[in-house]
Image: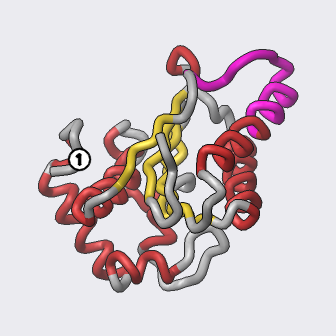
Amino acid sequence: MIYQEGGIYHLFNRGCDKRDIFLGESNYRFFLKKIRLLKVKFNLDIIAYCLMPNHFHLLVRQNSEVTIAKWIQKVLSGYVQAFNKQYNRKGTLFEGSTKPRVINKDIYLYNIIHYIHYNPIKAKLISDPADWSYSSYKIWISNSENSLISKKLREEFFYSAENYKQSFKEYTNSKLWEKDDLEN
């Protein structure tokens, strides 16, 4: 894949053999900290995210020529090293390289943001997306600033927290999350 400046990409990966990659709250927090620290260095925006016990979804906009591939490799290698040290283990943690999808249509962008936030509901971990602490949903529905995702991005796509809440509700009612191909 050729990453391009200004491009938006959905990145996802899961644990080897579908095993959990986050075993406790400290794992989730450390992963988010790595993302936060390295996003500035690599000049990119995190649009949405959801960390699930055995996989993750990141929606990222590349703002320079430095590719997202280098950023995600740095995030994951740092996370795996810390995880392996914490749990006294060796070897790979992830199933393979992180899979990217180019987001090149507005409707696909809106659907993928909703899809990412819907993940813990679909997995029957919670019934209200605001109850999942490892997703950007609460940031999207709040009016406060956040160092990981800025209010500016939400406003760029949905104008306000209320518009996003309504759009998310329409998405869940439409059952688009059941489709494998979110482009339609």
Is label 1 in a helix, a strand or a loop? loop
**Which residue lies at the image location 33% right of the left edge and 54% below the top edge?**
112
Q: Position of residue 174 (x, y in %)?
A: 12, 55
Residue 37 visible in rendering: yes
**Which residue lies at the image location 51% right of the left edge and 71% below the top edge?**
139
- Against 151, is 48 above or below? above
Residue corresponding to mark 1: 182
- Against 102, is 153 above or below? below
**Which residue lies at the image location 17% right of the left edge and 64% below the top edge?**
170
Does residue 114 belong to the magenta stretch? no
| Kind of residue at disc 1 | Leu
Q: Position of residue 72 (x, y in %)?
A: 64, 45
**Magenta region, residue range:** 79-95
Does residue 82 belong to the magenta stretch? yes
The quadrant where residue 86 appears: top right
Residue 163 located left or right of residue 140? left
Task: Return the residue nearer the eye: 89 or 182.
Answer: 182
Q: Position of residue 130 (x, y in %)?
A: 44, 62
Task: Return the residue nearer the eye: 63 or 22.
Answer: 63
